[in-house]
Amino acid sequence: QVQLVESGGGLVLPGGSLRLSCAASGSIFNIDHMAWYRQAPGKQREYVAAISPAGTTNYADSVKGRLAISTDNAKNTVWLQMNSLKREDTAVYYCSILMSGPKNIPYDYWGQGTQVTVSS
């Protein structure tokens, strides 16, 4: 079993910054990537960004240039630096981890989410 604990959410003014963190613990093996998703009220969960253990990153077009994902492999921790925040960034942000088991069977786990509210 794997546990993911997110932190760092809160209320921020438009144009402000926040840094989310996610710490993974438990039976962790063969990490494919760690990622952030978000879900705004009344909308489906959407992809935000991902990072591989090698440091390869990928971002949704809507956040490129404003959000940055980073990781500390030794600590199984991933961060999401959020700059120039907009009201439309308001959502619950979820951390996920995807691991590859024997015979390439995927194992994915999710955190409980952290609320980010961008408002004046």
Image: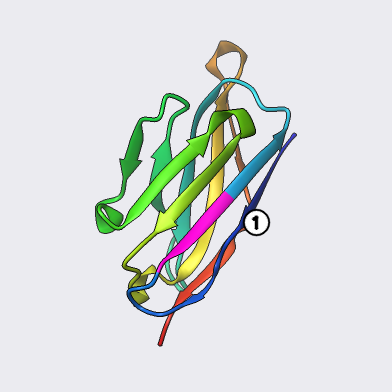
Q: Quadrant of the C terminus?
A: bottom left
Residue 72 within the segment the image draws in magenta: no
- Name the residue rendered at 35%, 62% in the picture: 83
From which residue to which does the magenta span run? 17-21
Q: Which image quadrant for residue 101?
A: top right
31 or 54: nearer the eye? 54
- Name the residue rendered at 46%, 51% in the picture: 80
Q: Residues within 10 Å of mark 1 (few under 14, many from 20)?
A: some
Q: Which image quadrant for residue 31?
A: top right
93 or 102: nearer the eye? 93
- Name the residue rendered at 65%, 56% in the picture: 112
Residue 105 drawn at (x, y percent) = 57, 21
Residue 104 drawn at (x, y percent) = 53, 16
Disc 1 designates what residue? Answer: 112
| Type of amino acid at the residue the image marks with label 1 | Gln
Left/right placement of residue 22 relative to residue 39 reads right
- Name the residue rendered at 26%, 52% in the picture: 64
Magenta-colored segment: predominant secondary structure = strand
- Furthest toward the bottom, the residue is 120
91 or 67: nearer the eye? 67
Residue 77 drawn at (x, y percent) = 58, 40
Residue 19 within the segment the image draws in magenta: yes
Residue 87 drawn above or below residue 73: below
Left/right placement of residue 38 relative to residue 31 reads left
Q: Quadrant of the N terminus?
A: top right
